[in-house]
């Protein structure tokens, strides 16, 4: 249920502008100027103790002096004065406020204190705040601009796309570009520092809004990843699409210096994985962002992702084929029925991408080929690459008409900067580009979304229990305060989650190690135990393969000596784990980490010595559905090798998928206890129905 106070923010009947100015060239003069220009039908109350009238409207000395309680207050004052004014607004009964000023948490200790004061007022009084350090909100559908962004003074076209941005400056650029694209908008929001209302709050409002079909979000960082993803899921259920442009990609977290899983899955990778997993149309440029939003608003998503390209030049056809391969987009076959419908040409070659081959001036040729390709069931996405063709207007018009008739996703690239030609595509809500890469980025994003829609609902993610077993709780409790769980305890936890580990016995003397090796059976591996040491191999604490008693003495002395040099004396004698050697054919890394935005995430990659050298890995937010576990395996560059081995009966991909699900369950249930899990390697052996954990580390949350 959407908070009614947020509804008032977008649909006020009365607005107060605190700090309003008569100078319409100043930021403090923009809000009133914009509302007057938009012919706002409600009541306007400029507030400024130094004026009796501002821009022709009666002015009041304070919020308390207003003749009624305004629905919204726009506060255009310096940061130090804002908390006092917001308190006055709250006491008056104002439901929501837009705080435009900067100088808060982004501006040092003093600004941070001002923002904390605002947060306290929200908690005490319940007033909702957009900002601070924001440009405001614009209900484009009803023509209500509340703020000072330059685009709020533009006569934007009403339509189905809402844009919320954590960057006020980029919001203006996006709105201006949308106007040039003839893309209609429902709302614009500059969220600023988000002391109260954040992107997820606006997303929730837009999901409930009948005028909005697509929500386009420019994201610097989310405050509540799980809530955001739940809202995205809700959007799919009601037929609404979320498009995102994530900026400021960087790694976060000190754990990144410890675990392979954390080093490989930084903040940017987790955002990308979450968007892909939950069906957010992810883009990486402003052009692709707006184009993807336009396609989502007016075109069906291409569920098979098979592209048909029509060009006007042979070189253009070659370029399009190269770009399709570069961006991993499949070029559709041309069905025999469609081939029969193509008029005779000088060239006998009929291929995708299709080149008109000098026949474009033949009467009826262009409409015939456009209709034939657009209606071909072998493709579900169309692209035109249009060069300086004499009949380019007819070609563009035929393409647009055919795409609309077939009801297929479509985009266009034009090599000449001709507004007349671009306008033909815009009238049909087909995004038009001059930059080839920007077009293919948008297509790639929309195709990924189409495939998500086709697969949605196949195997929901579940966890059997919300709490860890009592045995696991006790193990973690008994080691609280450590940075990393000892190896023996780590094995116990893994076994509780159904993960297989080799036979192992801990010894504190050579005689004990000899007895253990004979009991387990050669060959064995020796591992020195040093608390909180993340990587034993680099420290020389993992022996070579030990095949018998003679080798055991030498290896034990070597590992024991190195462990003694690293271990503090007060921790007692050195302990050496004698572990059964497990022969295997393949190695993968399987891990989990706690991401500050999305919570527990799981990583799978090529393991052993190749882990970071090749950086071949895939990431998902936990809990993971069974289908997603398989998709993680299929995304690896090494998948072709695994697939061939599985086809020959040498490897069980099902067993690997099950191991991923076990780690997903562990990551969810222990999210309050562990910072990262690093299984490297997980051994895959031909003919073995289970994977074996050869080495693992569990990094604990700080107490």
Image: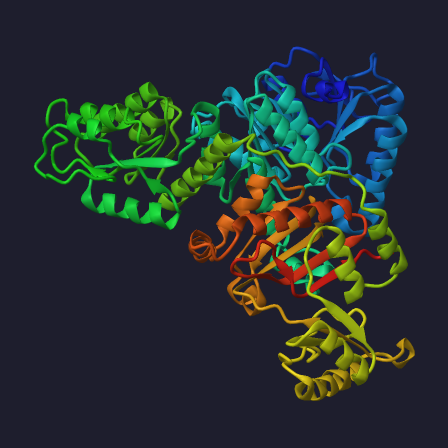
Give the position of the C terminus as an image quadrant.
bottom right
241 lies left or right of 334: right
Q: Residue at x 62, y 56 (%)?
A: 590
Asked whether 351 or 161 is in front, the reply is: 351
Q: Position of residue 184 (x, y in %)?
A: 49, 23
Left or right placement of residue 223 versus residue 701 in this view: left
Q: Quadrant of the N terminus?
A: top right
The count of marks equals: 0
User: Does 81 appear above or below 2?
Assistant: below
Please state if 419 lies on the left or on the right of 644 as rendered.
Answer: left
Question: Whole-percent x and y of residue 440?
Answer: 39, 42
- Left or right: where 430 falls relative to 366: right
Q: Nearer the viewer, residue 334 or 80?
A: 334
Within the image, what quadrant is residue 369 found in? top left
- Residue occupying image coordinates x 7% and y 37%: 346
In depth, the one of 439 and 408 nearer the eye is 408
Judging depth in this view, the residue of 128 and 652 nearest the camera is: 652
Q: Is residue 137 visible?
A: yes
Residue 166: give x, y in percent of width and height. 64, 39
Q: Which residue lies at the image location 74% right of the left edge and 69% below the top edge?
A: 504
Q: How is the image coloured?
A: rainbow
Residue most extreme to the left: 346
Position of residue 522 relative to residue 280, above or below, is below
Residue 153: quadrant of the picture: top right
Q: In the rendering, at what x and y percent does residue 344 appear?
A: 9, 30
Residue drawn where x is 68% and y is 50% of the image: 663
State the image quarter where residue 125 is shown: top right
- 476 is higher (above) or lower (below) than 585: above
Residue 245 seen in the current view: no
């Amino acid at each position: 249920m959407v908070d009614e106070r947020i509804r008032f923010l977008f649909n006020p009947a009365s607005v107060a502008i605190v700090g309003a100015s008569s100078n319409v060239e100043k930021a403090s003069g923009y809000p009133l100027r914009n509302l007057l220009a938009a012919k706002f039908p409600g009541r306007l109350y400029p507030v400024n103790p130094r004026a009796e009238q501002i821009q022709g409207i009666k002015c009041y000395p304070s919020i308390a002096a207003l003749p009624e309680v305004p629905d919204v207050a726009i506060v255009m004052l310096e940061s130090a004065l804002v908390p006092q004014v917001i308190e006055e607004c709250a006491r008056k009964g104002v439901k929501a406020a837009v705080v435009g000023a900067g100088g808060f948490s982004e501006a040092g200790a003093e600004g941070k204190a001002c923002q904390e004061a605002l947060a306290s007022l929200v908690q005490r009084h319940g007033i909702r705040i957009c900002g601070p350090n924001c440009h405001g909100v614009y209900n484009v559908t009803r023509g209500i601009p509340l703020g000072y962004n330059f685009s709020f003074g533009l006569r934007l076209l009403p339509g189905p796309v809402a844009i919320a941005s954590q960057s006020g400056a980029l919001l203006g650029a996006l709105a201006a570009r949308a106007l040039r694209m003839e893309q209609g908008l429902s709302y614009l929001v500059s969220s600023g520092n988000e002391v109260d209302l954040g992107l997820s709050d606006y997303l929730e409002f837009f999901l409930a809004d009948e005028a909005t079909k697509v929500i386009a979000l420019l994201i610097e960082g989310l405050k509540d990843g799980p809530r955001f993803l739940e809202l995205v899921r809700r959007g799919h259920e009601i037929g609404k699409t979320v498009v995102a442009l994530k900026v400021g990609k960087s790694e976060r977290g000190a754990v990144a210096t410890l675990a392979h899983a954390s080093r490989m899955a930084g903040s940017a990778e987790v955002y990308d994985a979450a968007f892909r997993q939950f069906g957010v149309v992810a883009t990486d440029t402003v052009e692709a962002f707006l184009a993807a939003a336009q396609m989502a608003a007016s075109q069906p998503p291409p569920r098979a992702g098979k592209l048909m390209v029509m060009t006007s030049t042979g070189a253009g056809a070659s370029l399009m084929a190269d770009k399709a391969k570069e961006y991993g987009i499949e070029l559709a076959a041309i069905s025999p029925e469609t081939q029969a419908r193509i008029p005779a040409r000088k060239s006998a070659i009929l291929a995708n991408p299709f080149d008109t081959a000098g026949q474009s001036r033949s009467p009826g040729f262009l409409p015939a080929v456009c209709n034939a390709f657009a209606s071909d069931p072998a493709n579900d996405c169309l692209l035109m690459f249009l060069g300086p063709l004499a009949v380019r207007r007819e070609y563009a018009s035929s393409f647009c008409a055919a795409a609309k008739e077939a009801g297929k996703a479509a985009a266009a690239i034009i090599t000449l900067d001709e507004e007349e030609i671009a306008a033909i595509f815009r009238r049909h809500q087909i995004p038009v580009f001059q930059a080839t890469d920007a077009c293919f980025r948008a297509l790639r994003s929309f195709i990924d979304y189409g495939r998500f829609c086709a697969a949605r609902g196949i195997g929901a993610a579940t966890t059997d229990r919300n709490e860890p077993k009592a045995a696991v709780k006790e193990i973690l409790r008994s080691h609280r305060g450590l940075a990393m769980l000892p190896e023996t305890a780590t094995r116990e936890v893994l076994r509780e989650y159904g993960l297989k580990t080799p036979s192992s016995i801990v010894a504190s003397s050579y005689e004990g190690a000899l007895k253990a090796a004979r009991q387990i059976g050669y060959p064995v591996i020796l591992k020195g135990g040093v608390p909180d040491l993340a990587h034993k191999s680099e420290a020389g604490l993992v022996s070579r393969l030990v095949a018998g008693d003679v080798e055991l003495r030498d290896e034990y002395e070597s590992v024991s000596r190195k462990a003694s040099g690293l271990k503090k004396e007060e921790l007692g004698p050195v302990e050496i784990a004698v572990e059964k050697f497990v022969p295997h054919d393949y190695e993968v890394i399987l891990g989990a980490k706690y991401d500050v935005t999305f919570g527990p995430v799981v990583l799978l990659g090529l393991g052993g010595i190749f882990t970071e050298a090749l950086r071949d890995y895939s990431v998902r937010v936990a809990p993971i559905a069974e289908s997603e576990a398989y998709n993680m395996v299929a995304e690896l560059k090494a998948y072709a090798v695994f697939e061939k081995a599985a086809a020959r009966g040498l490897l069980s991909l099902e067993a690997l998928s099950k191991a991923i699900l076990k780690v997903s369950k562990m990551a969810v249930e222990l999210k309050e206890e562990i910072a990262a899990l690093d299984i490297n390697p997980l051994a895959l052996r031909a003919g073995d129905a289970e994977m074996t954990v050869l080495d693992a580390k569990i990094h604990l949350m700080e107490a």
